[in-house]
Structure formats: C-alpha cells, structure tokens
Image (tube, rainbow, N blue to C red):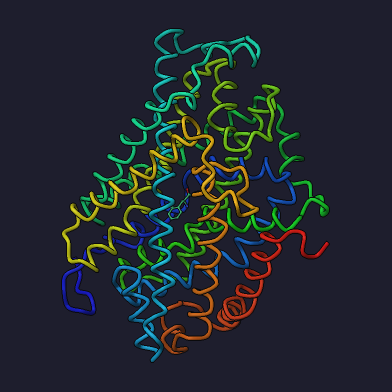
C-alpha cells in the first residue's frame, strides 16, 4: 500500500516487474491468439499484418505511453485521473469523457470476452475427455479427414446453455481475482500465468513449425499486396492494434494508476508493446501451419480457433495433449486480460460510488453476464437478431459481432483520438515532460506522433473504414 495524492491508502503494484507482467498480461490475450489470426485471415493476410505492425509502432505505442502517463499522474480510477491531469493543466474536467467512454467500452468488451473465455474452457474439457478416451499418443480422430471429424464433434455453437454456463464459470474466476484487489489478486494471476504462457507458446510454436506448412504460413502472413489494403482492412488492422494493446478503453490509464513514481513509463510501454506484438506474430506462426497442414480453410474468421483448430489437433499425433496444452495456454492469456477488463469499471465504481471492491466487482460482473448471455445466444436462438443492422458496417451481424465491432472500430479509435488531443495539446507540457520518461530527440518524436500523426491518421482511418466508397 502506498499513499496517493489524496492521502488515502491505495493499493499499488508491488514492484516494477509486477506492473510489467500485469500490463503485458492485460495486453496479451484472446486478442493476440484468437482475434489476430481470425482478422488476418478474414482481411487477406500480409497487407493487414504489415499495416497492423505500423499501427502498433506509430499509433499504439505513443497512445500507450499517453494512457499510462495519465494514470500514473492521477493515481485514481480512470475518469478521476483524467480530471486530475486536466486540473493541473487548467483544462476542463469534462475531458474525463474520454475515460468515461473507456469504462463503458471495457464493460462491453468484458461481456463478450468472457463468452470466448467460456469457449476456451469448453475445449479444455473436450481435450481432457479425448485423453481419457484415446490416451495421450493420438489425436482423438487421428488419420480421419476434416469432414469426418467435423461430423463427429458436438457443435459448441449449437449448444446455447453450454456456452452460457461456461461464460459464467470464466467470469466467476475473473471476478474472484479482481475482488481480491490489485497486489493481492490481479498481480498474482499475472505472476504465475504469464511465464507459464510464454513457455507453452514457444513449445507449441516449435511443434507447429515441425508440422510443415511453415513457408506457406510465412508467405501468407508477410506477403504485401498493396491492392488488398482497402479502407475497411486498414480500420480492421487499427482496431486490432488497439484491441491487442488494450488501448482506448481506459485500461492502461487504470493500470497506470497503480504505478509508483519511480517507474520509467517510456521503457515499460516499449516492453509491453513489443511483447504483445511478438505474441501476436508467434500466434500466427503457431496457428496457421497447423491449419494449413490439416488442409483446412484460413479465412474462417472467428471460427478459426474454435472450430478449425480443434479439428486439426484431433487429427494429429499427440493431438489431444497438444490441444489441451494449447487451450490451457489460451486460458491463461485470456484470464490475465479479463481481469484487466473487469478492473476498469470496478475501479470506477469504487471511486465514484464509494462501494467496497468486492461488491463493485460483483455488480459489474452481473451486468457483463447478462450482456454476455445475449452475445453467446446470438450464435444460437438469437441468430436472427441484428441490433445495429441499419448501419452499413454492421449489416447482417449478430449481437456478439456488434459488441466486438462497435468497441474495436468505434470506441477504441475515438478514445484514442481524444487521448492524443488531450495529452498532445491540452495537458500541461511540464507535467507531460516530467511523467513520460523520454529525453531528447525521442521525446520530440513522441510529441510529434501524439500531436499530429495519431489524431490525423486515426480520423483518416476511421473515415475510410466506415465509408469505404467515399474515395472511389
Ligand atoms: N488486449 C486484450 C487482448 O488482446 C484485450 C483487452 C482489451 C484487455 C482492452 C483489456 C483492455 O486480449
């Protein structure tokens, strides 16, 4: 515990490395493992991937530093931290809208994120079952064709009650750790699970690389075909960069609020962004060879990891064990992110309504469970429900996809635009200079990115992404 500016005791990360692990844990998650390969597959591979990397470096990283800086200065829940920076800069406290929107977005993401977390739990169960029925040496259906395997597997998406039940279990585990607090809960998850995650990821990537189809994967992920870089593909890549780095939803402002004065924010931001990007690329290198080798379709979108991949494992030698380890690894990554997502609105409730932490977390989780159940059932009994179908980009999408698209393609970029303008133009220069930990030319470069490149590029990408026909 350390003293905050207001003088009240406030929980903090116990060390710099605890903060890094927790922030990397927040960043690395289903976004890297499930969403990145699915989006890359759906948006044509190479062009998407390279534009994504550019977004991480030129937009994501400067915004990441901006968010942690606001949080560390404010030492509070996100909206209050923004107000403190604003007041120290003699600016309007209403800039807190950028964090307020973020809190709402984090809540919306939490609701569908835990649905996907539930799918992960389901497959952990499936592979444990496979090991019991067919031993560890084989895949449950080794040697059989993809179609045959598909016909044998029960379809998760057809089973509404199962999805809702698993969603509940995953959210309950998340809730348990958030209720225990920052240093006593969130930090513990990251401390154990992130190292285990990295070991498993490297092991499975090596296994995938031996399975062949590696060059095919490299071609697919890194061949740049400029004509494929359309407005919607750019917006998808940008949204993915934000989603993956946990930006634009006040997540890093919230985590920054538990960082001590002695931590260099520029250095830690660089570590967080590099680790996150490395994991996304490794996930691609780990997943696609398995999918290619099994002769399955890469353009499968969200189903890639939860329909295509499990089938691929079940056809491979040692597939049941590798499949189990794979989904355990995904579960670790997902949990260290879902705790971050739950922490953002929870911290806000504690701060705003003076409700104790466990109760705040329970209230947020109950709301997320309600929305999550609707999202899960949108693959199922609610599949004909198209809540924002009248907006062109959401045409034909169910509630789950609407939640995902709305947050990644609207809330996150808009939150980031406001953050860039706030830190670049509104906040007091001395305060920024003191907090950011950058010197010399790098400092000027960062300032240039935050002031000019980020807002302009973000507005541009939003426009071409939402109105692709505009410049034809
Ligand atoms: N970055 C996380 C992931 O990639 C998701 C997330 C978004 C977590 C926003 C916290 C805040 O899975």
The quadrant holding residue 147 is: top right
Locate residue 118 relative to residue 214 in the image: left or right.
left
Along the viewing direction, whichever of 369 and 218 lies nearer the viewer: 369
State the image coordinates of residue 107 (x, y, percent, origin top left).
38, 54
Q: Is residue 287 above or below residue 422?
A: above
User: Would you say 154 lies left or right of 52 here?
Assistant: left
Instruction: Tell how many labels.
Output: 0
| Image quarter of the N terminus | bottom left
Q: Position of residue 181 (x, y in %)?
A: 22, 55
Q: Is residue 350 above or below residue 433?
A: above
Residue located at (65% from left, 28% from top): 291
Q: Position of residue 157 (x, y in %)?
A: 49, 27
Q: Residue 376 or 109: which is nearer the viewer?
A: 376
Q: Nearer the viewer, residue 273 or 370?
A: 370
For the point 59% across and 33% down, the residue is: 304
* Image x and y of residue 180, in percent: 20, 50
Q: Is residue 135 above or below residue 112?
A: above
Q: Is residue 137 above or below residue 438?
A: above
Rendered image quadrant of residue 208: top right
Instruction: In the displayed orientation, state which residue is furthest to the bottom.
Output: 90
**Side of 125 relative to 267 (left or right):** left
Relative side of 255 to 225, left or right: left
Q: Residue at x 70, y 46 (%)?
A: 43
- Quadrant occupied by the C terminus: bottom right
């Amino acid at each position: 515990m350390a003293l905050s500016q207001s003088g009240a005791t406030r929980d903090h990360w116990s060390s710099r490395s605890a903060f890094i692990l927790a922030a990397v844990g927040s960043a690395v998650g289903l976004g890297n493992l499930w969403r990145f390969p699915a989006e890359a597959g759906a948006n044509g591979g190479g062009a998407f991937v390279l534009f994504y990397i550019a977004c991480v470096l030129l937009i994501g990283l400067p915004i990441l530093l901006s968010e942690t800086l606001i949080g560390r200065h404010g030492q509070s829940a996100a909206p209050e931290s923004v107000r403190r920076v604003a007041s120290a800069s003699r600016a309007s406290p209403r800039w807190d809208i950028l964090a307020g929107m973020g809190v709402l977005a984090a809540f919306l993401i939490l609701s569908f994120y835990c649905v996907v977390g539930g799918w992960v739990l389901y497959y952990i169960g499936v592979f444990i079952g496979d090991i019991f029925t067919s031993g560890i040496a084989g895949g449950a259906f080794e040697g059989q064709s993809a179609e045959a395997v598909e016909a044998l597997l029960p379809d998760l998406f057809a089973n509404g009650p199962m999805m809702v039940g698993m969603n509940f279990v995953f959210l309950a585990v998340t809730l348990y750790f958030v209720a225990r607090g920052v240093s006593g809960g969130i930090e513990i998850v990251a401390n154990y699970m992130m190292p285990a995650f990295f070991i498993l990821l490297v092991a499975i990537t090596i296994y995938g690389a031996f399975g062949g189809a590696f060059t095919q994967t490299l071609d697919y992920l890194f061949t740049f075909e400029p004509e494929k870089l359309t407005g919607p593909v750019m917006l998808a890549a940008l949204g993915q960069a934000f989603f993956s780095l946990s930006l634009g939803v006040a997540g890093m402002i919230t985590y920054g609020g538990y960082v001590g004065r002695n931590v260099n924010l520029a250095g830690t931001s660089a570590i967080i962004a590099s680790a996150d990007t490395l994991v996304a690329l490794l996930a691609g290198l780990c997943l696609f060879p398995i999918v290619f080798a099994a002769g399955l379709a890469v353009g499968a979108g969200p189903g890639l990891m939860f329909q295509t991949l499990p089938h691929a494992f079940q056809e491979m030698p040692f597939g049941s064990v590798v499949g189990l380890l794979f989904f355990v690894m995904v579960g670790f990554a997902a949990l260290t992110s879902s705790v971050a997502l739950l922490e953002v609105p929870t911290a806000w409730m504690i701060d705003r309504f003076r409700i104790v932490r466990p109760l705040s977390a329970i209230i947020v989780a109950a709301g997320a469970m309600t929305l999550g159940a609707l999202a899960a059932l949108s693959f199922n009994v609610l599949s004909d429900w198209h809540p924002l179908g009248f907006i062109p980009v959401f045409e034909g999408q169910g509630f789950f996809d609407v939640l995902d698209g709305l947050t990644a393609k609207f809330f996150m970029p808009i939150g980031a635009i406001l953050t860039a303008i706030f830190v670049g133009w509104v906040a007091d220069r001395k305060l920024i200079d003191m907090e950011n930990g950058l010197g010399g030319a790098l400092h000027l470069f960062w300032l240039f990115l935050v002031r000019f490149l980020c807002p302009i590029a973000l507005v541009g990408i939003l426009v071409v992404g939402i109105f692709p026909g505009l410049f034809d």
